[in-house]
């Protein structure tokens, strides 16, 4: 044993010295790092940085989530060159036609492959300045990033407050391009000029844009793309707890030329500043273009419901506008008075061969900061009524798209811009914490390395051997239990299922209903036994296998129903105990849906964040009164399971309007002092 510890000491000393030499030679290639808990104790700066990092990561949870990339064929504006062929100073300028109060400017990055690189933020200027000019040409600088390089924003906007400055022109002057090897470029996806809840760049008629240079390659690149309302950000949306609602969809026609319209009633004649049309989004059907968005479209307003006299806001019948993907399409209203707003499709969208439709997620009509169309009555030339829980005329003005709700531009863009700033600060903190590590390693190594190396190595060796022995014992026990369950109980259940099926076929005198119930119970028992065997058998139990096991359970139980299972944030597998609770809780929830809900569609979502999870099941069934379900529908068992997981069970439902059951808890610990076994 003495020789063993001598070898351990020599090995540890050699490793420590080698690590210290590595630190002194090249900090970027260090072998050792001090654990965070120790680093916080021995270095005050590290502790303060770590506290700040945790605060920022908590703040991220309260900010708007980054949207999916919704870029259309219109990518934005761009100039490029090689080496010195691109003049360093470039500018773009938006002319609103008259002076307006401006509250903020939002610069939206472009997203397109360039110079062998495919990522968001390509071409965003490293140094730039944002200026406002009034009718007389007087300039006001509202942002100046020309002294140091601006961090690339990636897929998030740069929000610049203007504090109500009156201006006619907005100019962005760029002084240092994005570069890759010899390639130099400037690019922007969109420039938004915000006044209250409106983007004046798209909501005003007659807005123009100029630039010092431009790659005019329509539809992808053009200076006009800076004010077309289409960018990688898409529509301003946030998570909603309301039921799924896709929007309005017309009847289905065999000819694309069938003229189809939908209109809203604002209740009274009033001035209209802008109209927004938002394409529908059905992820399970397509994720590359707006569902049902027509090829040829006309938007008009009238004071009469029959549109005997009307004003055309825009007519894209002769020159189609193109698919905006999922971006809102903004049409200036010019302040014209109207009570009714109508969108007419003259060339329908082809859903499949011989089937053509017109669909929209939302129609919004703004006067100043207010959406006059919110909750307004909707009429249409036709309505697709086969899926009333997904598509309905009233869904066109309900403020929802699928499971998300519409929010206003300023709060959404400001929150996304703040997310960008927070992420950049976190990255800087992590860089500084990594830079401190060499100092921490040297201090820790010289202070405690020589004194504790033998003790630590010896203890670790004994602990390792004990763990190995224990692991071998546990593995053997797992194999035996798994084999017994599989060979004896599993085969018996399978035999029961087979015999009852034969008895049913041969009319052996057993009532058919009883035989079917026996067979069903036997099959369910066999499936449950397979789940138990999977949990206890040796081998990997990682996050992908857990996700697949959960999906398999849903697939088996929801056979014949329309369902969707979304899993987010499950990067590492929880303990086997927690995996068992998750699997059994999901099965209990789905059994409740099958027994009581009478649902046609079920939405399942498992989300993980900061060692906590939420398992949520929604259905569009008959619902229930929450106040009367204290112990019903098997909720007592689910509440007990939530308690054991250190969480709680939430119920939402109304008769005839579906239900939501959500169970949350910890992924890393299970309460052990419960008297009941679940």
Image (spheres, rainbow, N blue to C red):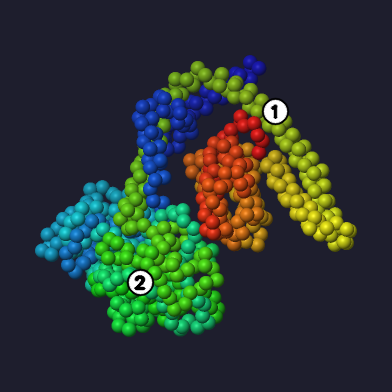
Q: Badge 1 is on which residue?
A: 469
| Marks 1 and 2, the one that precedes in the sequence | 2
The quadrant the N terminus occupies is top right
> How far apart are the alpha carbons under marks 1 and 2?
76 Å
Q: Badge 2 is on which residue?
A: 265
Q: Residues within 10 Å of mark 2 (few under 14, many from 20)?
A: many
Tell me the SS state at disc 1: helix
Q: Which of marks 1 and 2 is in front?
A: 2
Q: Which residue is drawn at 32% across and 67% down?
A: 365
Which residue sits furthest left?
136
Question: Which one is nearer the viewer's eye here, 392 or 473?
Answer: 392
The quadrant the C terminus occupies is top right
Q: Do the residues labelled 1 and 2 touch (CB within 8 Å)?
A: no
| In the rendered image, the vertical position of residue 572 relative to residue 230, given as above or below | above
Q: Can residue 423 be seen in this view?
A: yes
Instruction: Give the quadrant of residue 477.
Output: top right
Q: Which residue is drawn at 73% across and 37% down?
A: 478
Q: Which residue is drawn at 39% across and 59% down?
A: 406
Which residue sits furthest front?
628
Q: Which residue is drawn at 85% across and 54% down?
A: 499
Question: Which one is nearer the viewer's eye here, 362 or 81?
Answer: 362
| Apparent side of residue 553 relative to residue 350 in the rendered image (left or right) | right
Which residue sits furthest top?
2
Q: Determine which of the numbered discs, if any, sits on residue 487 in the image.
A: none
| Apparent side of residue 589 relative to residue 283 in the rendered image (left or right) | right
Tell me the SS state at disc 2: strand
């Amino acid at each position: 044993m003495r020789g063993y510890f001598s070898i351990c000491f020599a090995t540890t000393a050699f490793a420590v010295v080698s690590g210290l030499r590595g630190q002194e030679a090249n900090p970027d290639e260090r072998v050792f790092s001090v654990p965070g808990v120790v680093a916080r104790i021995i270095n005050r700066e590290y502790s303060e940085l770590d506290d700040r990092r945790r605060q920022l990561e908590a703040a991220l949870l309260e900010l708007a989530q980054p949207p999916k990339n919704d870029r259309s064929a219109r990518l934005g504006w761009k100039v490029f060159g090689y080496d010195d062929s691109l003049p360093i100073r470039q500018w773009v300028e938006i002319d609103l036609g008259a002076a307006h109060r401006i509250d903020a400017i939002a610069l939206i990055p472009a997203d397109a492959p360039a110079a062998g690189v495919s990522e968001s933020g390509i071409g965003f200027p490293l140094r730039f300045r944002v200026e406002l000019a009034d009718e007389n040409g007087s300039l006001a600088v509202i942002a100046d990033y020309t002294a140091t390089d601006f961090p690339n924003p990636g897929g998030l906007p740069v929000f610049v407050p203007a504090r109500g400055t009156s201006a006619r022109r907005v100019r962005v002057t760029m002084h240092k391009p994005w570069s890759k090897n010899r390639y130099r470029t400037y690019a922007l996806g969109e420039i938004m000029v915000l006044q209250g809840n409106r983007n004046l760049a798209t909501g005003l008629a007659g807005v123009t844009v100029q630039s010092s240079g431009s790659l005019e390659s329509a539809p992808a690149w053009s200076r006009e793309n800076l004010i077309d309302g289409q960018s990688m950000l898409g529509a301003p949306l946030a998570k909603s707890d309301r039921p799924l609602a896709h929007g309005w969809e017309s009847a289905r026609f065999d000819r694309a030329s069938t003229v189809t319209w939908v209109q809203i009633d604002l209740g009274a004649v009033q001035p209209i500043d802008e109209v927004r049309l938002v394409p529908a989004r059905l992820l399970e059907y397509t994720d590359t273009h707006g569902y049902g968005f027509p090829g040829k479209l006309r938007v008009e307003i009238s004071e009469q419901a029959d549109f005997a006299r009307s004003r055309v806001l825009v007519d894209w019948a002769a020159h189609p506008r193109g698919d905006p993907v999922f971006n809102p399409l903004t049409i200036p209203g010019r302040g014209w008075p109207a009570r009714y707003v109508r969108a007419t499709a003259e060339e329908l969208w082809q859903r499949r061969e011989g089937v053509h439709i017109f669909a929209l997620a939302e129609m919004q009509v703004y006067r100043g900061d207010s959406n006059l169309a919110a909750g307004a009555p909707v009429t249409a030339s036709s309505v697709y009524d086969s899926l009333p829980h997904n598509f309905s005329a009233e869904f066109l003005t309900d403020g929802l798209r699928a499971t998300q709700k519409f929010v206003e531009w300023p709060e959404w863009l400001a929150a996304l811009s703040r997310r960008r700033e927070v992420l950049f600060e976190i990255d800087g903190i992590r860089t500084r914490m990594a830079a401190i590590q060499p100092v921490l390693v040297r201090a820790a190594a010289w202070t405690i390395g020589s004194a504790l190396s033998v003790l630590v190595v010896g203890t670790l060796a004994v602990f390792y051997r004990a763990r190995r022995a224990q692991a071998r014992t546990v593995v053997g026990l797992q194999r035996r239990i798994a084999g017994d369950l599989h060979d004896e109980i599993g085969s018996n259940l399978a035999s029961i299922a087979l015999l009852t099926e034969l008895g049913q076929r041969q009319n052996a005198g057993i009532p058919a209903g009883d035989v079917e119930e026996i067979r069903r119970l036997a099959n369910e028992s066999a499936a449950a036994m397979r789940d138990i065997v999977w949990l206890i058998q040796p081998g990997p139990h990682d996050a992908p296998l857990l996700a697949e096991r959960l999906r398999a359970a849903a697939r088996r139980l929801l056979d014949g129903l329309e369902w969707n299972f979304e899993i987010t944030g499950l990067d590492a597998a929880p303990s086997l105990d927690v995996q068992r609770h998750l699997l059994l809780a999901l099965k209990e929830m789905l059994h409740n849906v099958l027994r009581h809900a009478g649902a046609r569609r079920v939405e399942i979502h498992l989300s993980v964040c900061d060692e906590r999870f939420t398992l949520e099941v929604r259905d569009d069934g008959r619902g229930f009164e929450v106040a009367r379900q204290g112990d019903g529908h098997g909720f007592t068992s689910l509440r007990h399971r939530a308690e054991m997981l250190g969480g709680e069970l939430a119920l939402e439902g109304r008769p005839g309007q579906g239900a939501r059951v959500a169970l949350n808890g910890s992924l890393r610990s299970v309460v052990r002092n419960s008297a009941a076994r679940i």
